[in-house]
Image (cartoon, rainbow, N blue to C red):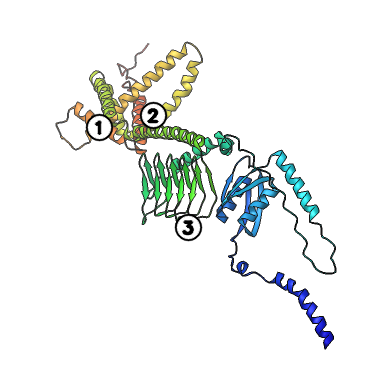
């Protein structure tokens, strides 16, 4: 029993330090666990650092050339561990000033110093032989961190200088063209030169602003775009949110299912805002001026094309308006009245042919118009035939106009107005008004115009414009003469 007592006391004295070393301190037990993140990303090194900073809620300032393509797959690590791992892997200088992390590519001297420090740390951390009694080996001292060299002037704008201006211009043009191609439905809202707000209870398809700010408090089913202004999102956006020449601010409760990009501005994402897609921003005065200039050019081109399209639409659908209608009426009425004044018999034959055989006159007019092309081609082969071809076309157009007025006269004659008191001028005027009004109708007007022209031209061909063949004349004497 005495021997056991002598052995027990030394054993307790030797085991006490080990037990104390294994027991966790109360402060460590009460310290909160660091926030862990999961990162699965493939893209540029700059975007990878941005993603880690956003997921971990860190303040990170990255400068220099960071366009290397990387692939990061991390799970259950802290954001600070992820930054340090990437810094060691891609030779980045990582400095911490309180809650701010600064990262940039290492210089040549810094890379050599880091390699030597890593070799020294690896040599000093060789595993010693296990002594008979367990002891705690002394930890190697950390190598001194070399002082950060002074930042050269203009380094803060280096990332901005590396952006290709042509790429930004093309992106702005594509987005403007995309906004132009959108169908202006009842649920699309577009503002030019003044602010636009999608209210809390509103739901729209697209929201586009040119030259002002956009506020989204409700729901947008597709995209949100601002050219030359800021975007504030409080509600939800199912598509993308883009700002060209302005900032995008995502307030608490904002939800964007697509991508968020600010070209010529910054993306400000407050706590409680959610973005399911990617986030990018290219700020700075140079980029902002470039985007503003390109937006201005694109908008000028858009308005110029829109004005030209509106003029074309007016010309096609409205026939040039009331002045052009009056000019056409006056010209046709004058030619028709002159034709009836100087060629009354021939104009009467045209009207009779149109009234009795309208379908035949139209078919003959179509065939005659088609035949004009090969006849003109044959005539223009020789120098002498060219003037003949020109005169032929001039005569055909004049005959067609007179035939058109003959068709108008037939229409005016059948109008149930002023029965028994219509003069030839009144009949012609009524018919021209009705016929020109019908030719002004979109799509249908072209069919009416061509039908009237072909019918008048065909009637002129059938009657040879008043020189209809009356048959073979009878002989003067019916009794045969003898020789």
Q: Gap between marks 2 and 3, in whole Å?
A: 76 Å
Q: The C terminus lies in which quarter of the figure?
A: top left
Q: Tag 1's secondary structure?
A: helix
Residue 85, how many percent across, how many down?
A: 67, 52
Within-10-Å neighbours for mark 1: few <14, some 14–19, many 20+:
some
Q: Residue at x 56, y 38 (%)?
A: 156
**Where on the picture, by quarter, is residue 404?**
top left
Using the rendered image of the protein, determine whether residue 62 is visible from the camera's viewpoint: yes
Is 27 placed above or below 395 here?
Answer: below
For marks 2 and 3, give the one nearer the viewer: 3
Residue 44, how many percent across, how many down?
A: 63, 45
**Mark 1, residue position:** 433
Using the rendered image of the protein, determine whether residue 463 is visible from the camera's viewpoint: no
Q: Gap between marks 1 and 2, in whole Å?
A: 23 Å
Q: Between disc 1 and disc 2, whose residue precedes?
A: 2
Q: Tag 3's secondary structure?
A: loop
For marks 1 and 3, give the one nearer the viewer: 3
Residue 19, how many percent across, how many down?
A: 72, 73
Between residues 258 and 285, which one lies in front from this camera angle?
285
């Amino acid at each position: 029993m005495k021997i056991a007592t002598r052995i027990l006391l030394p054993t307790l004295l030797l085991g006490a330090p080990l037990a104390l070393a294994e027991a966790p301190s109360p402060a460590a037990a009460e310290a909160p666990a660091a926030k862990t993140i999961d990162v699965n990303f493939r893209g540029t090194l700059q975007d990878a650092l941005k993603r880690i900073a956003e997921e971990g809620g860190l303040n990170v300032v990255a400068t220099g050339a960071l366009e290397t393509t990387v692939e990061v797959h991390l799970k259950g690590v802290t954001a600070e561990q992820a930054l340090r791992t990437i810094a060691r892997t891609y030779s980045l200088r990582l400095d911490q000033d309180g809650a701010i992390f600064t990262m940039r590519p290492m210089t040549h001297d810094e890379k050599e110093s880091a390699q030597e420090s890593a070799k020294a740390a690896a040599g000093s951390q060789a595993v010693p032989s296990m002594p008979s009694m367990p002891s705690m080996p002394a930890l190697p001292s950390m190598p001194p961190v070399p002082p950060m060299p002074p930042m050269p002037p203009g380094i803060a704008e280096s990332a901005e200088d590396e952006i290709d201006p042509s790429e930004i211009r093309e992106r702005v043009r594509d987005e403007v063209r995309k906004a132009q191609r959108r169908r202006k439905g009842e649920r699309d809202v577009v503002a030019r030169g003044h602010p636009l707000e999608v209210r809390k209870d509103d739901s729209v398809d697209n929201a586009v602003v040119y030259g002002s700010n956009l506020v989204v408090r409700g729901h947008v089913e597709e995209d949100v775009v601002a050219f030359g202004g800021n975007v504030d999102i409080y509600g939800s956006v199912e598509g993308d949110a883009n700002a060209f020449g302005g900032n995008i601010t995502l307030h608490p409760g904002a939800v964007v299912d697509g991508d968020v990009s600010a070209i010529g501005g910054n993306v400000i994402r407050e706590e409680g805002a959610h973005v399911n897609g990617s986030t990018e921003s290219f700020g700075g005065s140079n980029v902002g001026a470039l985007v503003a200039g390109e937006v201005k050019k694109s908008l000028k081109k858009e308005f110029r094309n829109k004005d030209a399209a509106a003029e074309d639409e007016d010309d096609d659908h409205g026939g040039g308006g009331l002045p052009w209608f009056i000019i056409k009426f006056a010209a046709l009425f004058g030619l028709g009245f002159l034709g009836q004044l100087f060629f009354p018999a021939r104009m009467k034959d045209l009207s009779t042919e149109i009234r009795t055989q309208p379908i035949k006159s139209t078919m003959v007019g179509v065939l005659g118009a088609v035949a004009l092309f090969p006849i003109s081609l044959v005539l223009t082969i020789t120098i002498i035939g060219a003037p003949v071809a020109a005169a032929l076309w001039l005569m055909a157009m004049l005959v067609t106009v007179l035939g058109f007025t003959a068709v108008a006269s037939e229409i005016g004659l059948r109008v149930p107005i002023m029965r028994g008191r219509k003069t030839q001028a009144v009949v012609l005027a009524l018919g021209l008004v009705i016929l020109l009004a019908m030719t002004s109708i979109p799509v249908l007007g072209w069919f009416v115009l061509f039908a009237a022209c072909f019918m008048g031209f065909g009637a002129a061909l059938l009657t040879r414009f008043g020189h209809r063949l009356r048959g073979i004349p009878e002989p003067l004497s019916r009794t045969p003469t003898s020789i």
